[in-house]
Structures are given as C-alpha cells and as structure tokens.
Image (cartoon, helix red, strand yellow):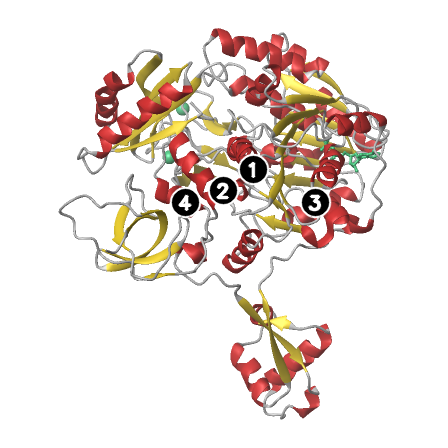
Amino acid sequence: MSSTARIALNRPLRRLFDYRIPDGTPLVPGQRVRVPFGRQQATGLVVETGVTPPPGITVKPILSALESWPALPSETFRLLSWASDYYQHPLGECLFTALPVALRKGRPAEQKQVTQWRAIGDPAEVPAGAPRQRALLEWLSGIGKSASDQEIIQAGFTRQQVKALLEKNLVQANTTPAQPAIAPHPDYDQQSPTLSEAQTRAAEQLARPAEGFGASLLYGITGSGKTEIYLHYLKQHLGRDEQALVLVPEINLTPQTVARFQRYFGTRIVVWHSALNDGERLSTWLKVRNGEPVILIGTRSAVLLPFTRLRAIIVDEEHDSSYKQGEGFRYSGRDVAVYRAHLNDCPILLGSATPSLESYYNAQQQKYQLTRLEQRAGQARPPEISLLDIRSRPLDGGLSQPALGAIRKTLERGQQALVFVNRRGFAPVMMCFDCGHMVDCPRCDTRLTYHRRDRAMRCHHCDYQTAATEQCPKCESDAFKPVGQGTERTEDVLSAHFPDTPVVRVDRDSTQRKGSIQAILERVNTGEPCVLVGTQMLAKGHDFPGVTLVVVVNADGGLFSVDFRAPEQLIQTLLQVSGRAGRGAHAGQVLVQTCHSDHPLLKTLCEGRYLDIADQLLAERESGQFPPFRAMAIFRAEADTMEKALQLLDQIKPMAQTTGVEVWGPLPALIARRADRYRAQLVLNSDNRKRLNHVLKGICTHLDQQRLPGNVKWMIDVDPQET
Ligand code: ADP
Ligand code: ZN
Ligand code: ZN
C-alpha cells in the first residue's frame, strides 16, 4: 500500500492537493517535490504524509523529491503555518514566501557559481588584428583582480572577446559562489565607544533574565545610541555557533548600521533586502538554512528565513509601518518576529525612540519588559522643539520668513540644516485661484499631484499622467498655479535663497539609482554647510552629526485625519525627524510650521516626551475601542462598480455579526476608486482575537465555496495599518 502526501502549491488557493508517494521515497513536511499539475508540472511543499485522500479521487504520483532534506525546517514550517492561520492567507503562498525565487521555480538548492576572469598573459601577445581583445586584456591586467562577465560587459567588452582570449590561453577562469557584496564602509575601522552610564544601565537591564523567551521594549530617544545596545545584547545572548536576526525597516538608507555590526562581528554579518539578485538571495538563504552562525540584518521578509539555530532577535525602529506587508500575505514582520522568538524560546528586543502604541501597551501590561534610555550618547543634548504658527504669514516654497532666517543663521555658523516636507496627507496640486478648480484623476478619487520638473500632473495611486496646462481647464483663467508643497519646489526656493550652498534633495525620485543615497550621505558627512530637503526618507535612523536645525514645513496633515493611526504616525514622524538635529557637538533646534499651534498634540510634542504623548493617544484608542484594546480585521472588496463591492460585503456582514464581534460598514474605502476599481470595506472589531479569527475563517470558507463574478475580488487585512 503506498502512502499519500498533502502538498501545498504556490497558488492563491485556500486548499492543498493530494499526491501518491512513490515507494522508497521518504518524505517529511517542508520538503520540496515536483508534481504534475494540470498539464504542467509544479514545485510543491510537503505539508503532511500518511493522509487518506477523499474517496473517488484519482491521486497522481509525486514525480520526484527535489532534495532529501526539508527546505523549510520544522520550526520555520510551524511559524508559517501559524501565520497562515493568523492572517487568514492561503498556506501555499505563505510557505513559498520563505523560499528564494530560484527554489520556488524548482531550481536546485545549490549555490549559483559565478565565473571570474583573470589576466595571465601579456597584452602584447594579442595579434594586432584584434584591438578590442588587446584592450580587454590591458583592462583586466590594469584592475589587478579578476572580473565577472557582468563587470566585463559593463566595462564595454563582450563575452566573445573573453572567449577568444581564453582560447589563446591569455586569461584564466575560476568559479566562485555568488555572494552578496557588502560594500565596506569608511567607518569600518573606527573604534567602538565605551558605553555611557545610561547605556550601561540599559544594557544591564537587558541582560538575559532567565533562559527562554522574553520580549523587551527599548525606548531609547533619538541619538541615545541604541545600536551600541543592540551590539551589546547580541554579544551577551549569542554563542559562537548560534544565529541571530536583526530586522531593520530599510537597509540601504543606513549603511552605517551595517558597518557598526561588521566591526564587532566581521564576516558573521549577512544582509537580506530587496536589492539582492536571485543568486545572492539563494546564497544567503543557504547559509541560514545550513545553520551557519550568521547574524542576518534584513528587511521585513528576513523574518521568514529558515533559521535552524536562531537564538536572538532584534527589531530596530519597531514602530515603522514598513514592517507590515501592504498586499498579498499581509503579515507584520515585527509581530511574526515576536511569535518566532516564542517558538524558539529565545529573547527578542524591540527598539524605538517612538514605540508603537501596540508595543508600549504590551509593556504596560507587563508582557514586555520596558527599558528606558533617555539620554543622548556622547556630548549630544536633545533638540529643542518649537512651533511656528504660519497662519497669515507669506510663504515661499512653503517656508516662512522666520524659518528661512533660521536656516541662514545655521549656514552662517558653518552648520547644516534639514528641511522636512511631510508628504503624508499633503501633495502639491494645481489650483485655480479664480474658480478654485483642482484636477482630479479620471480613474481614482484623488487629486493629481503636480511635478514641476517636467510640468506633469500625476496620480500617485495609479499611473495616470497628463501635461499641466497653463490655464484653468474649467474657467480658462491664467491664475492656475500649484499649491501645497512638494520637495522640488522647496528645493528651488532654497537654491534661490542660498545660491552658494549645496541644496541636497532626498526623496524616492532622487535616490532611485543604486548608490545615489550613499553618495548623498557621504557628502553630508563631510560636515560642510548644506541644506538637506526631503520627505519621510530623511526621518529614518540617519546619523547626521552636522545637522543642527530641522525645519518641518507642514505638520498639519494627520492632525484631523479619519484614520485612527494618523495622530500616532504624525507624532512619530515629527519626533524621528526632530531627532536628526543636534546629534553632534552642537545643540539642535527644531522649528515646526503649523496652522494649529494650539493643538494639544503639538503642544506636548514640544516637551519631547514621547511616552507622555503615547499615554494620551492610548487613552483615545481605548475610548474609541480601537487596537491595541481590540483586535481588528478589515474585509476589503474591489469591483468594477461600487454596488458590487458593497453587495459582497453586505452578504458576509450577517456572518460577521456574532457575539463579541462588532461590525462597521460596509463603507466605501477612504480612496473609494483607484485605477477605475471601486473599493469598499467592512471592519471587524473584537475583544477576543480567537473569536475574530474563527469568524474570519468561517467567512473565507463560505466565500471559497462561492462562484463570485470574475471582476469582484476580496481580501482580508488582519491588524490593518491603514483603515
Ligand atoms: P539611535 O539609534 O539611538 O538614534 P545611534 O545608535 O545612531 O543612536 O547613535 C547615535 C550616535 O551616538 C552615533 O554617532 C554613535 O556612534 C554615538 N554613540 C553611541 N554610543 C556612544 C557612546 N557611548 N559614546 C559616544 N558616542 C556614542
Ligand atoms: Zn489615478
Ligand atoms: Zn478656474
């Protein structure tokens, strides 16, 4: 009697598939197999063996096992099964998220080899009839090391030319495994500082209380030297042959952090982020899976990698919204990390200057141990924050006269200034100053954003774009001008005011090219006077010792938003960006331009005590019955008409309305139309997470058994970041 295995496929289907196990093929959960699927073949992952297939079904045989060992070891497998259930996302897609693309496609789990070419002959030996070959050999000899095909092509030569040189025995090939290159950082050799008194106290508190799981929340103000604490933590908790995971929101923005880890741990440091290519990913994945004692610094999806000896986890900037995946498998990297620490019986440290209300609440409930670090490291003092009321003040590129004056003074003192343009809630739009007309996206319910550089108007929610007109399209008035501030306009105004000072713009557009952010950071770190202008990107974890002034162009987006998380995010952003000021020897000053200088939230901001603000915000969350006091999930529906989207949600609403679950909606989403698709949502809210999970599961099963019209889609978002 042959046995049957239940297999997960990388398909958005909430079901598994049964296949017969060929005799003599031992299989365990997590192992990769090749199976027939329809008329094709597919890569599958074993979920269970020894199952009984439903009667009357012909079970096809598994074609082969791709390895003799499980690609997903049991702990990783359990983690992903839990996440599939918690986030109500199909198991197959969850499991495959933990595999690099090469392995999803069924390629062998072996390191990709890269061929490197080295010059071994004299360029003079190349026949004169082949000048390009000679040039290539000269180039190869000149660089004094071996070069890959890719580097050779980048240098302007061809594969054929290399081959010709090989045949003439003038170059030699050697193959090495593809390795993600970590660029050496200029700080690499710097001495690490001795911990300050405050740091020592924090580090002592974080010393292992006992064996096993334990979560700590490190509230350390900006510039308090959290990175040194992380290093200390790892040194204490990690044995020589154990693995650690360090989650960061965005790796390319903070090469300094990686460098500091390298200084302590050298080659144990490996990285994981979106800029790696498939070969580099596979190479790192294999190191982790093989149990090499790596310390992996990575972004969100690193939490799903197949560690086998994970003994410590750190989540830096744990409040950062980029930890939540925004589509598909909508997991929170931070929350999955906490569960993973549980599974591994190991400690986890969440660090932030502005902890999420969720984590802070857990600390208040004694689930996490709270450690405070409220002094800046070294000589630096916390910056002084003040509000600058801009009601009825003339603005130039969004900047008031006092703000421009403060920038001038800073530059005159030989220091650097940072101008922060809050994109969230604000965007420059074209408006008619005669009739008030603004241009909407024809496919979405949003306004088009004006881009000065190419005089285009673009929708930031779909790809629609059109040329900006000189006149109002409605009343043909000439008073059709941009309002609101974008970084480009602010940059132009600053350049005009300070023609002798470099103005450096940092946003998505200016940093898209590989290495451009590094170039910008290096320039800033020379300490020469300059003005940095940018968006959210500038608020994240940078250490700019020369910056002594931060100007926040517009603080008001988010103060009156309907999204329950908006005030928290606004305060976090403002404090994070303020934290870029005065990190070096000179004191920092922060000017926050606002039209609401009497708003209580902004007033407390000036006192700079985040936990006091967090207490206020938590009280509001409690009275509004919002997370973290309740568990929340959103059912989102999308269709070609609003009617259909609402109809689907109306249909499932009665199933959601059970004891202990509150249901809001269905309502059109905040942006009800996006790329000509209509979006609606149903919010489920409960004081009992288990019950909520049960209700979600019931609705999913119901919907899966239904035939929905082809253009209606639905998805679930558990612990939503955006409402
Ligand atoms: P945070 O992440 O808490 O904002 P960082 O870890 O980036 O802070 O540290 C801020 C700055 O303080 C860095 O330049 C770091 O090198 C420096 N620093 C950290 N600890 C010390 C110390 N004990 N003595 C002197 N400088 C320190
Ligand atoms: Zn649009
Ligand atoms: Zn008009």
* Residue drawn 30% across the image and 34% down it: 676
Specify the label residue 239 is tagged with: 3
User: Does residue 197 show up?
Assistant: yes
Quadrant of the image containing the C terminus: top left
As drawn, the label of residue 95 is 4
Ligand 1: does it lie within 8 Å of the C-beta at label 2? no
| 3D distance between C-alphas at marks 2 and 4 | 12 Å
Q: Reading the chain from its start, which is encountered first: label 1 or label 4?
A: 4
On the rendering, which quadrant does ligand 2 occupy?
A: top left
**Residue 214: x percent and y percent?**
62, 28
The residue depicted at 26 percent of the width and 49 percent of the height is 18
Residue identified by numbered label 2: 75
> Which tag, 2 or 4, sits closer to the chain's start?
2
- Point out residue 659 in the picture as x, y percentages from the top left corner: 31, 11
Q: Do the residues labelled 2 and 1 touch (CB within 8 Å)?
A: yes
Question: Does label 1 or label 3 sit earlier along the sequence?
Answer: 3
